Image (cartoon, rainbow, N blue to C red):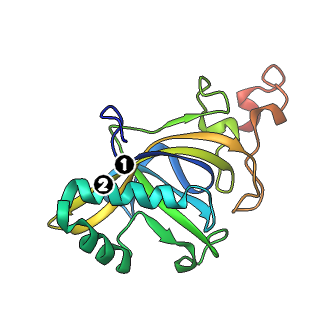
Amino acid sequence: MQSKATPVGRILIRNARLAFPNLFEATTVGGEGKPSFSASLIIPSDHAQVAEIRQKMQAVAKDKWGAKAPEIYKGLEKSDKLALHDGDTKGYDGFSGNLFISARAQEASPPSVVDTNPQVKLQPGDGKIYAGCYVNASIEFWAQDSQYGKRINASLRGVQFAGHGDSFGGSRPAGADEFDDISSEVEVDDFV
C-alpha cells in the first residue's frame, strides 16, 4: 500500500540512458513557453520497472479521474498522451526498440543532479552528465486535465549519474581532470 508521505506517482527509475539532458539551465522549446529543465529517460522494453511505471501512471489516473480512470487511461495510451512512449516513434540514436519517458521540471524547481555518491552535486563541466550516460532518475507522474487536454506527464525531480555509456553525439565531454593547470603559464594578453 502506498504511504501518504510518498505521492502515488513518485518512482525512482534505475539504469536509464539519458537523452536530451537539459539539467543545469532552464530553457524554452523553440523560444516559446516558460523556461524549464528536461530530459528523456530511455529504457529497454523489457526493463524490470516497466510494469511498475505503468502501475504508477494508472494510480495517478485513478487519483484524478476515479471510476472513469480505466477508460480515460486507455484513450490516453492510444493517443500517445502518457509520459511513457514507444522509442520507435523517434528517429534519434538509442531510441529504436526501446521505451522512453519525457520529464520536465519548472524553472523554479530545478532537478538535483548528483554523482554515484548522492552527497556530491554534479556541475555542467564534470563530464559525467551527457546524452548517452546511464542514470537513476527520480520522477513523479501527474495527471493533466486542462484546456490543453488530458495527459499523464512526468516531473523531473533529480538525476543520479550511474555509469558511462556511448555518447549519442560521439564522445563524451572532456572532464576537468583531462587538462593540466596552465594558469601560471598563460597571460590573458597572449590571446588578444
The one of 43 and 1 positioned closer to us in this rendering:
1
Q: Is mark 1 on a helix, strand or loop?
A: loop
Q: Residue at x 76, y 58 (%)?
A: 166
Q: How far apart are marks 1 and 2 (CA)?
A: 6 Å
Is tag 1's residue or tag 2's residue first in the polypeptide sequence?
Answer: 1
The residue identified by callout 2 is 60
Residue type, label 2: Val
Question: Label 1: few (<14), some or many (≥20) within 10 Å?
Answer: many
Q: Which of 113 and 44 is in front in this view?
A: 44
Q: In which quarter of the view is residue 99 placed?
A: bottom right
Does dot 2 land on a helix, a strand or a loop?
helix
**Above or below, comparing residue 155 to residue 102 in the picture:** above
Q: Which residue is drawn at 75% across and 33% down?
A: 176
Identify the image quadrant of the C terminus: top right
User: The N terminus is located in which quarter?
Assistant: top left
Q: Where is residue 101 in the image (x, y as percent from the top left)?
A: 49, 60
**Residue 75: image x %, image y %?**
29, 77
Residue 63 horizontal side relative to residue 127, left or right: left
Q: At which x and y percent is residue 182?
A: 83, 26
Residue 9's mark? 1
Marks 1 and 2: CB-CB under 8 Å? yes
Q: Where is residue 59 in the image (x, y as percent from the top left)?
A: 33, 55
Q: Which mark, by number, is residue 144?
A: none
Q: Check the image and report above or below for 151 versus 187.
A: below
Which residue sits furthest top? 184
The residue shown at (64%, 44%) is 129
Q: Quadrant of residue 6?
A: top left
Q: Which amino acid does label 1 sit on?
A: Gly
